[in-house]
Image (cartoon, helix red, strand yellow):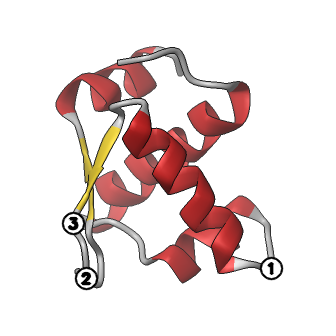
């Protein structure tokens, strides 16, 4: 996995926390709300960046199509 920016790490931490609490990934709209942004496009942009860096995989056309790659999940938990 490539090095994440501070913001990307924050978003990954939000994804891991949400998935641990709920048992499934957030929607893009839910992620935007968790990030404190009004635009779901900002959340989608962060997801694409995390996908390019190998932290998550995205399942096209799936409602909650975010899958955290195991290594990224472990790193997010260790950094807390």
Q: Residues within 10 Å of mark 1 (few under 14, many from 20)?
A: few
Camera-side mark, 3 or 1: 3
Tell me if residue 34 can be seen.
no
Tell me if residue 49 can be seen.
yes
The residues tagged by marks 1 and 2 sit, at their Cα atoms, a distance apart of 22 Å
Residue position marked by numbered label 1 in the rendering: 38
Which residue is found at the position 66% from the left and 73% from the top?
Answer: 41
Tell which of 20 and 43 is nearer to you. 43
Which residue is found at the position 26% from the left and 70% from the top?
Answer: 65
State which quadrant residue 1 falls in: top left
Q: Position of residue 77 (x, y in %)?
A: 40, 25
Q: Position of residue 24 (x, y in %)?
A: 25, 67
38 in relation to 32, above or below: below
Residue position marked by numbered label 3 in the rendering: 59
Residue position marked by numbered label 2 in the rendering: 61
Q: Are marks 1 and 2 in contact (CB under 8 Å)?
A: no
Which residue is found at the position 70% from the left and 65% from the top?
Answer: 42
Callout 3 secondary element: loop
44 in relation to 6, above or below: below
């Amino acid at each position: 996995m490539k090095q994440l920016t501070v913001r990307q790490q924050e978003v990954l931490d939000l994804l891991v926390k949400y998935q641990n609490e709920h048992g499934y990934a957030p929607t893009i709209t839910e992620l935007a709300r968790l990030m404190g942004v009004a635009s779901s496009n900002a959340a989608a942009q962060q997801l694409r960046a995390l996908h390019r860096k190998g932290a998550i995989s995205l399942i096209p056309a799936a409602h909650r199509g975010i899958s955290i790659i195991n290594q990224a999940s472990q790193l997010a938990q260790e950094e807390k």
